């Protein structure tokens, strides 16, 4: 599970020099990073397919388990270090300070007018669809394995939930900000709903 320091902040920075270069390119197609988009879905979808068809593909549980874990590991690395940066301009990572404390950093690429012209909505949809849908499937697999007493598969599906859930959590933090921002957004939303309800009741009673 992810742990975090109380000083965590979502940083609005330029992630890499290469990112600055890509903003100067004219938009030629909806998908500007076809290879990254492909591998963003390939590893995670392949892991799901192998899990569903493992009994047909091989009679060896160990072979299926190792294959799924390798696909999940490749997916975790690719999504965390490559596709998130290229497709949506987000990145999360951890570093150890001089005092030995662990800090989680959630970064988003600095938004400029040039960025807005080159942002690909198709890539963004691909990224978030794959990021959200697959962890939900692994949660379903976990309950299915538990209720059907397929105990030997629990370790595999839990690995899927943890690895893909970690990326989902990290990128949501990058997108919406730190815990303080999340609390502020929730409080603001509830306050607006409460005020709207009271206003409607007052108008009805008058």
Image: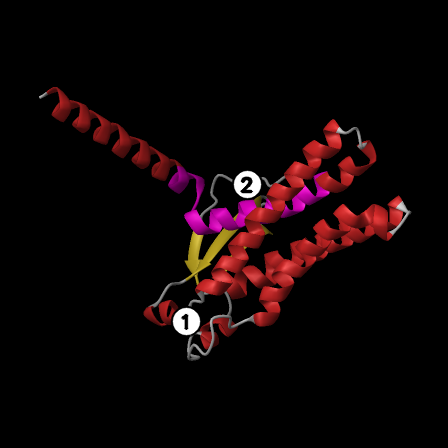
Q: Nearer the viewer, residue 70 or 95?
A: 70
Q: Which residue is mark 1?
A: 118
Q: Where is residue 113 drawn, in percent x and y?
A: 32, 69
Provide residue 125's location: percent of width, then percent of height. 49, 58
Q: Main secondary structure of the magenta part?
A: helix
Q: Number of labelled discs?
A: 2
Direction from residue 153 to residue 117 in the image, left or right? left
Residue 71's disc is: none
Disc 1 to disc 2, how far (Cα)?
A: 33 Å
Above or below, comparing residue 174 to residue 150 in the picture:
below
> Which contiguous range is marked in magenta?
158-182
Mark 1, residues whose alpha carbon is within 10 Å: few (<14), some, or many (≥20)? some
Q: Which residue is mark 2?
A: 4
Q: What element does badge 2 sit on?
A: loop
Which residue is situated farthest in the left direction here? 206
Quarter of the image that includes the N terminus: top right
The residue most toward the right is 59
Q: Quadrant of residue 108?
A: bottom left
Q: Secondary structure at mark 1?
A: helix
């Amino acid at each position: 599970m992810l742990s975090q320091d109380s000083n965590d902040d979502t940083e609005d920075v330029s992630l890499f020099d290469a990112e600055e270069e890509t903003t100067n390119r004219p938009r030629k197609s909806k998908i500007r990073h076809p290879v990254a988009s492909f591998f963003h879905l390939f590893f995670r979808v392949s892991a799901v397919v192998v899990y569903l068809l493992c009994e047909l593909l091989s009679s060896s549980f160990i072979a299926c388990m190792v294959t799924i874990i390798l696909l999940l590991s490749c997916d975790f690395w690719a999504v965390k270090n490559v596709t998130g940066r290229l497709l949506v301009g987000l990145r999360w990572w951890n570093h150890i300070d001089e005092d030995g404390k662990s800090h989680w950093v959630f970064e988003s690429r600095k938004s400029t007018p040039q960025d807005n012209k080159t942002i690909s909505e198709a890539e963004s949809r691909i990224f978030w669809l794959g990021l959200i849908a697959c962890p939900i499937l692994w949660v379903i697999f976990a309950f299915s394995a538990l209720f059907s007493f397929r105990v030997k598969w629990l370790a595999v599906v839990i690995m899927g939930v943890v690895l893909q859930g970690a990326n989902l959590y990290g990128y949501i933090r990058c997108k919406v900000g730190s815990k303080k921002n999340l609390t502020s957004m929730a409080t603001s939303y509830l306050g607006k709903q409460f005020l709207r309800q009271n206003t409607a009741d007052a108008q009805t009673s008058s």
